Amino acid sequence: MKRLVALEDVAEVNPSLPTGVRSTDPDTLVPFLPMALVSEEGSIAYGEQRRLGDVLKGFTYFGRGDVILAKITPCFENGKAAHLHDLPGDIGFGSTEFHVLRAGPEIDARYLFHAVWNREFRLRGEAHMTGTAGQKRIPTAYLKSVKVPLPPLAEQRRVAAVLDRVERVRGKRRDAMGLLTALTLSAFEHSVGDPVRNPRGWAVRTGEDLFASLDYGTSVKCHTEPPLGSLPVLRIPNVIEGQIKWTGLKYANLSPKETEQLKLRSGDILFVRTNGNLDFIGRCAVVEKNADALFASYLIRGRLSSSEGYHPAFLQAVVSHPSFRSRLTAESKTTAGNYNISVAGLRRLRFVAPPLDVQSAFLGQLGALNRLRRVMSKFVMEAGTLTSRLAGAAFGSSA
């Protein structure tokens, strides 16, 4: 029988700022971590610094060796967390949407990281989030009370070391996926050029021209367990990495009229329209088959006009290009801490529109790259499955 302990019994949750820090020179530069610099793979892109005087109030404090964990949806569910073992400073500050855990003498910090980063922990935590849709967060009280297995320190370190090794393998496979992403960008620019500067002088169409319709999804309450006669409702976590993910689905019953209006079909494009993280705004994926499925209000469905001669997959490639993303996010508005892109904003955007043969030639290259991507993705998934199984064996009795 594994010994279970509440996190607050072995770790300090959201530790207070040490009193001496307030008397430090306010011009001192300290590391700063916005949510965007913390990956879903447990790593951090350090680099940003801010004046201590500018971050003492209104931001989250942490120290070297702490574990940070995103508290807000969908960052929590997607696994944004990190162990700050290599923080370039004794202290740092970051987004207010982080929880901070400081390991006590009974728990290894790396073990603590894996205890709160594993998929099962996130699935259980999702059920305890509070707040309105799009602003749901993991409560501090829940984090303090949640229980994790606590074997002896030597065993904790062994478990953490094994999980770290598997993650390094998965990381190398993800790096290979990153090379494919770079190749895709290179292929696009070779075939089309920069979609914003448009150096080849292709025709340009507005979203108003291209889309036969742009629609917001349903705001009806969704359920994890499908009620009788309900349909799956795609949400923000289902539009990721340029694909529709048919996992982690929720379900809802709509009227026949609403169901007919919001049912997805092949060629529809789903855009993320609102999120607390600007990086999510405008992310999109193409629905590749007719589906008895709906979409939630935090997404916008675009349905291309058949008369404009534009491939949905080509539009996704345009929208995913870094220069176009900069233009798209410039259209976003901020409301109550959330960024938003509207139907009107999508209609105003200008899309490069090369002839169909140019689009098709690029999409042929994209198809070959995507076939390779699927193979590599399978390898990444296999490593992820192994991580989940090992983490499940180590932490599966937590509650």
Image: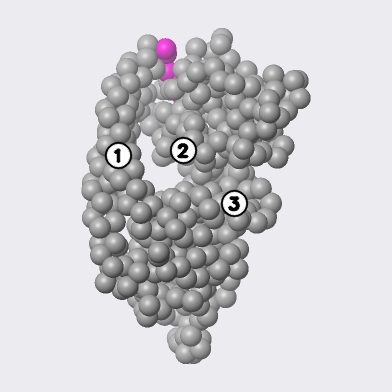
> Which residue is pictured at 50% across the width and 70% down the height?
6
* Residue 255 screen position, x and y as percent: 76, 25
Toward the front, the furthest residue is 1
Residue underneath mark 3: 127
Q: Residue 223, relative to residue 353: is it above or below?
A: below
Residue underneath mark 1: 382
Identify the mark nearer the N-term, 3 or 2: 3
Does residue 374 appear left or right of residue 104 in this picture?
left
Q: Give the range drawn in magenta.
A: 352-356
Camera-side residue of 392 and 358? 392
Which mark is drawn over residue 250?
Answer: none
Does residue 130 appear left or right of residue 87 in this picture?
right
Residue underneath mark 2: 240
* Mark 2 crowdedness (10 Å alpha carbons): few <14, some 14-19, many ≥20: some
The amino acid at mark 1 is Glu
* Residue 227 screen position, x and y as percent: 67, 32
Q: Residue 348, relative to residue 310: is it above or below?
A: below
> Which residue is pictured at 74% across the width and 20% down the height?
256
Q: Can residue 368 be seen in this view?
A: yes
The amino acid at mark 3 is Ala
